[in-house]
Image (cartoon, rainbow, N blue to C red):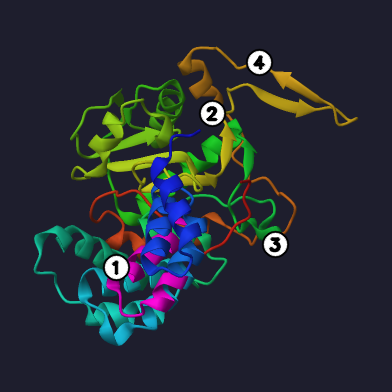
Amino acid sequence: MAGFDDLRQASAQLAAEPGSPKALYDFGYACIERGIAYLAVPALREALRLLPESAGVLRELVAAYEREDRNREAADVLAAREASLTDWPDRYLLVFNAVMAGDLPLTRSQFARLSTPEDEMWLPVHARISRTVERAASAGTAAPLDRTDLRGWQFVIGGSLLGTLSPFGFEAGMHGRYAWLQDSYSLCLRGLLRLRAALAAAGARPESVSLLPDRDSLILGLAAAEVLGLPAEPFAPGRGNTVVVAYRLDALDDTGAIAAQLVERAPGQVLHEHASCWTEAPPVTADSIALLHQTAVAPWGAQQRYDRSGRAEGLDADDRPAEALAAAVVQADPSADPGDGGTPADSDEAFAAFAAAVGPTWFLGSRDRLRSPGPVPSSRFR
């Protein structure tokens, strides 16, 4: 009924020949193509057991693991065949999945063996993984890079400085990420103040704030101009020495044209995103991120509040002009929400020290989309 003829045919063939490596592979491939990689894993795992020397089956199984953010399993299945791996793409895949699994010893040892690719198609990938390893070295001087170090790992895997941590649910599995968030003016201001601190710590000196056209970003951009003490001007592709401010990068425009213009960094350009979705990563990765969420409602959007009896009451969106809402951000109280008391302390001084430590590796390379949330796990709504 859905029109997935390839998956229907592959399923029928596998049902008829459950022990056929080809039928297993074709079924796994179709599942990945149709966005249900978790169903591909057992079929491809069995195909690899039957054909242990098949590089094609191995790579497809790794692709299925990656789609499901099961980077530890991807690294393990590659490491088990380490002696026979080709550098491109297999050893590269081992390095990538090792770092996304948080295994820095394996990352370093395999990266040291990774040759510079002869095929030009792999050169951008080689440059990207080289920057990742370099960022891991600088972040490791100022952060523990353990399974709860969200800020440290966010910088390693994407080059993003994470401004704030969620004060709720840290010990219940969120580790600094938000699940569902009704955003506030205070949190917007706190994110901008952390951006200002990061720029100062890294020695960045932008000359303007670039305003993106969507309303949420326009509001936050006007507020950023006040906080940073810089003039505001409409966004222009390729402009350097400017801070481009987005509320959410995945909401820029329907065509994705602006996001595409931000992937390659102009000299001195800094991209700040306030609310970044970690379960559906935006098409471009910001240099500075105020918070990570799964679902967020802007402070001026249609929100809900609850009375003492627990009944929900809907609040209409605030349709005041962008300038008035930006002023509300600037005038807000930036004090951190105490939350539930379980989130580790996150002082301004500690944040600035981390920003200063990673500053030399902060603005390097392109802003490629993140394909994995990295090694710090979080609970999520499916």
Q: Earlier in the sequence, mark 1 or mark 2?
A: 1
- Residue at 22 percent across and 61 percent down: it is 125
Q: CA distance from mark 2 to mark 3?
A: 30 Å
Q: Residues within 10 Å of mark 1 (few under 14, many from 20)?
A: few
Q: Residues within 10 Å of mark 2 (few under 14, many from 20)?
A: many
As drawn, which residue projects farthest toward the bottom?
Answer: 83
| Residue 213 to residue 361: above or below | above
Q: Which residue is mark 4?
A: 316
Q: Which residue is mark 2?
A: 329
Camera-side residue of 246 and 332: 246
Residue 353 appears in the picture as rendered:
no
Q: Residues within 10 Å of mark 4 (few under 14, many from 20)?
A: few
Asked which secondary structure carries label 4, the reply is loop
Task: Identify the magenta region.
Answer: 46-70
As drawn, which residue projects farthest toward the front?
Answer: 16
Residue 322 appears in the picture as rendered:
yes
Q: Name the quadrant containing residue 176.
A: bottom right
